[in-house]
Image: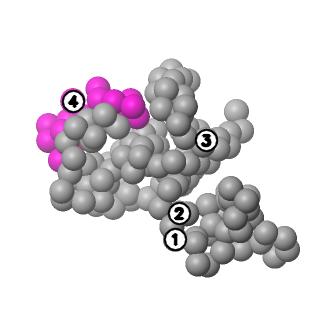
Amino acid sequence: TLVDLIIGLLKPKEGQILIDKQELNASNAKNYRQKIGYIPQNIYLFNDSIAKNITFTDAVDEEKLSKVIKQANLEHFIKNLPQGVQTKVGDGGSNLSGGQKQRIAIARALYLEPEILVLDEATSALDTQSEAKIMDEIYKISKDKTMIIIAHR
């Protein structure tokens, strides 16, 4: 619920949410949400390519896509797929493990180059080594971003 308030999906019943001393309200919520990269615990992927699930577009910036694939620790996995980033993931990511889905969601959020990055249990399905690699990459880019990390480990 706190995350939903922070990212502007819920309105507080009492009080207000202030971002840089400005109240988050209906008139500025859309603009604010465009600055957020949100990585939820439960990820939905649609039955399309890995590239499309990361970028949501056919006009892919290949350099940026390669960069976020590396940051999300997906390089080795994608390199071993016969169709690479054009591999279809299945409805809801049914052809992928939980960790692979989470890494695609992380790449998706990073592709947007957000000012604010919210990780809500975003690494819960990853092994310790994968989590450490991804968090190291995220910390490298975090110097110019606001980071909100929710974890129960």
Q: Earlier in the sequence, mark 1 or mark 4?
A: 1
* Amino acid at pointer 1: Lys
User: Which secondary structure lies at badge 4?
Assistant: helix
Q: Residues within 10 Å of mark 4 (few under 14, many from 20)?
A: few
Badge nearest the viewer, 4 or 3: 3
Q: Which residues are magenta?
A: 70-87
User: Which secondary structure lies at badge 1?
Assistant: helix
Residue assigned mark 4: 79
The quadrant in which the N terminus is found is bottom right
* Amino acid at pointer 4: Lys
Q: Earlier in the sequence, mark 3 or mark 1?
A: 1
Q: Which mark is residue 33?
A: 2
* Amino acid at pointer 3: Met
Q: Is disc 3 in contact with disc 2, using a CB cutoff of under 8 Å? A: no
**Residue at image point 27% right, 48% down:** 50
User: Which secondary structure lies at badge 2?
Assistant: helix
